[in-house]
Image (spheres, rainbow, N blue to C red):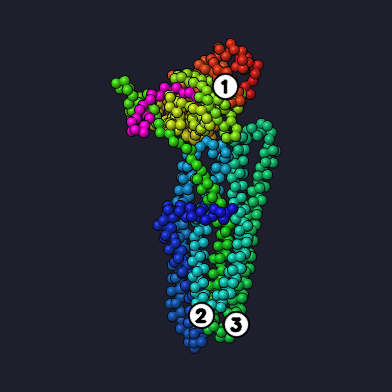
Amino acid sequence: MAKRYDGATVKRLLKYIVGHSKVLFIISCICILISTAASVVGMMFTQVLIDEYIAPLLLAAVPVFTELAIFLCVVGCVYLIGALSTLVYTRLMVKVSQRCLKSIRDDMFDHMQSLPIRFFDAHTHGDIMSYYTNDTDTLRQFISQALPQLFSSIVTVLGCLIVMFYYSPLLTSIVIAMTIAIVIVTKKIGGKSTAFFVKQQRSIGNINGYIEEMLNGQKVVKVFCREKKSEEVFAQKNKQLYSDSRQAHKFSNILMPILGQIGHLQYITLALVGGIMVITGFGSLTAGIVVAFLALSKSFSMPIQQISNQISMVSMALAGADRIFKLIDESPEADDGYVTLVNAKEQDGNLIECAERTGVYAWKHPHHDGTVTYTKLLGDIRMVDMDFGYVPEKTVLHGITLFAEPGQKIAFVGATGAGKTTITNLLNRFYDIADGKIRYDGININKIKKSDLRRSLGIVLQDTYLFTGTIMDNIRYGKLDATDEECIAAAKLSNADEFISRLPDGYNTMLTGAGAGLSQGQRQLLAIARAAVADPPAMILDEATSSIDTRTEKLVQSGMDKLMKGRTTFVIAHRLSTIQNSDVIMVLDHGRIIERGNHDSLIAKRGTYYQLYTGAFELE
């Protein structure tokens, strides 16, 4: 499987590396060439040192070391230049790798924001986090360590091969034969480890996802005494990771000792054959050439062994890069809408677009003939014969038809899984319907740009999420350009101002851990304030009071009543007492609307709603 994507993955990864640090990368390559050249030239100096300086001095009656000292200074300068070049490219490659990783993380996160809800439903949070941690870390090691090592090794191999062939074609043929053996061993053993490194990265993502899930649900685990079962599931996933990692590292770890022994065998063979050639005078070899050749053969074989040693790192990096690029290549949320939401005001009986916020919104509808029409946003929402299924083969909503007139409060009642939240998800276009129509002020919502559609719909969920930051920041999340006065007014509207004022730092109180220091009711009040500051024309309240006590519910309900005033509102509630004043109540069962009407008319029917209200049936 690795061979199928390695070429494309490497090519794409190199575009990231070169594209964002082209100058630094070129300088690094030049420094690698200088460093490698200094190393090869230094080994060639060994032959000159022995044959032209040391040997004559051994035969001289009165040896003079002046020329030898000068020569050694030259050799020292060459090695110093090589050392400085190594230092420069090592430091530069760290910068290149960090720039590349920053760019990749930016692209991942930017693209992740464009993905549909369906993607996050299908992937655990821990697995997604693994893209940003484990997978990017493998790329860091590859770019800063393995890549320059590979390039240096290739240049060293070519340089040594040319010089060795110049010294002795016969001895070079022995080195090439041994190298072929090294390549064969590397291909057989290294190829086996690559597939397991791919599996290892996937196993890491799976185990991270499970750990994240257990951390978030730790209270539930303890309440139901599921610690033992959690340990068993973790042990199973950990065993799979152990198995994949063991197989991957088993092959990569045995590779170096085998290659090392082949290298020792090569060194002994060259020393033996070279010694014989010097003694017999065959090939015009000198002792200096043999010593230099042995050093060159080591430098020739060592990079090949280093390349083999880098296979595990390269395999891990390619596996991580492949996962990252698959995330970046995920199809973004499709949005072919062209109708946008704008601020408007009435002038001479007509709607015109304006920059300031007037409290009046309009749908800006461009037409093919170049004209633009404006439709006032009233909150008239209609669903006609709507069918939907999360997967094509299983329909969960059947023929849903409903009408919400401007300012009306529409309530959904039904058992868990009846389709209440699904309807509101379709209204936000988190998913698209399979059949039927949804019209917003007479406009098919498929024509409305998704960001503008969602901007017109405020939402308060049962599970409120607060971000790390001050309370003021969390309220302002609903409208990033809101002033402090607007945020405080929204808090007062939602009844949140009272408890905020009692906090030590008031609106500047820092929240962490999704607002862990606040009660569920306080978090809900902040969520209502966040929706209020956005001032949306329509609202969705998804079981916003189902997990708080009755006393707090009255406070939250009061805040929601103020928020709903004058707005078209869809309410999902388990507590029927909170929806008695709804204009229309829809009773759902298995994806179908089985009853509709206001509270009094449904009670009079003495049907499902009546039985739910009187306790004859339970919602669950």
Q: Secondary structure at mark 1?
A: strand
Label 1 crowd (10 A; few <14 / some 14-19 / many >=20): many
Q: Secondary structure at mark 2?
A: helix
| Image: 180 above or below 124 | below
* Residue depicted at 63% across the width and 55% down the height: 248
Of circles 3 and 2, the one toward us is 3
Marks 1,3: beta carbons within 8 A: no
* Residue depicted at 47% across the width and 37% down the height: 334
Q: Label 3, on which residue?
A: 276
Q: Residue furthest bottom?
A: 61
Please report the bounds of the magenta region as a residue range.
364-383
Residue 593 numbered mark, or none: 1
Q: Position of residue 443 (x, y in %)?
A: 43, 27
Residue 346 numbered mark, or none: none
User: What residue type is disc 3 on?
Assistant: Ile
* Sequence order check, earlier mark of 3 and 2: 2
Q: Label 2, on which residue?
A: 50
User: What residue type is disc 2 on?
Assistant: Ile
